[in-house]
Image (spheres, rainbow, N blue to C red):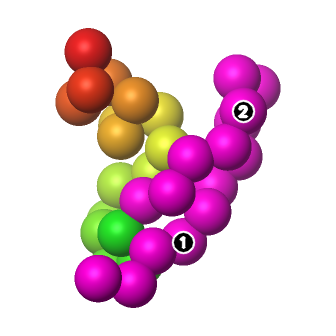
Amino acid sequence: MLMREEQDSIGSKKVPKDAYYGIQSARAAEN
């Protein structure tokens, strides 16, 4: 799976390249 790295105020995280969501949604899904 291809990933892209996004950054926010907390840090950086890899999310799937074809995902329509960003880093904040990925963090929320982990919680």
First-in-chain label (2 vs 1): 1
Residue 3 magenta-highlighted: yes
What percent of the width, then of the height, locates residue 3? 45, 74
- Disc 1 target residue: 4
Picture quadrant of residue 9? top right
Residue 10 magenta-highlighted: yes
Main SS of the magenta part reads strand
Left or right, 22 with reference to 10: left
What percent of the width, then of the height, locates residue 17? 41, 78
User: At label 1, which amino acid type do we have?
Assistant: Arg
Residue drawn at (63%, 55%) of the image: 6
Between 21 and 14, the one nearer to me in the picture: 14
Cβ atoms under marks 2 and 1 closer than 8 Å: no
What percent of the width, then of the height, locates residue 27? 40, 29
Find the magenta span and give its range. Answer: 1-15
Residue drawn at (23%, 30%) of the image: 29
Asked if residue 31 is positioned above or below residue 9 in the image, the reply reads above
Report crowding for label 2: few under 14, some 14 to 19, many 20 or more residues within 10 A (C-alpha).
few
Please tell me the numbered disc located at residue 20.
none
Residue drawn at (29%, 82%) of the image: 1
Residue drawn at (67%, 43%) of the image: 12
User: At label 2, which amino acid type do we have?
Assistant: Gly
What percent of the width, then of the height, locates residue 4? 54, 71
- Disc 2 target residue: 11
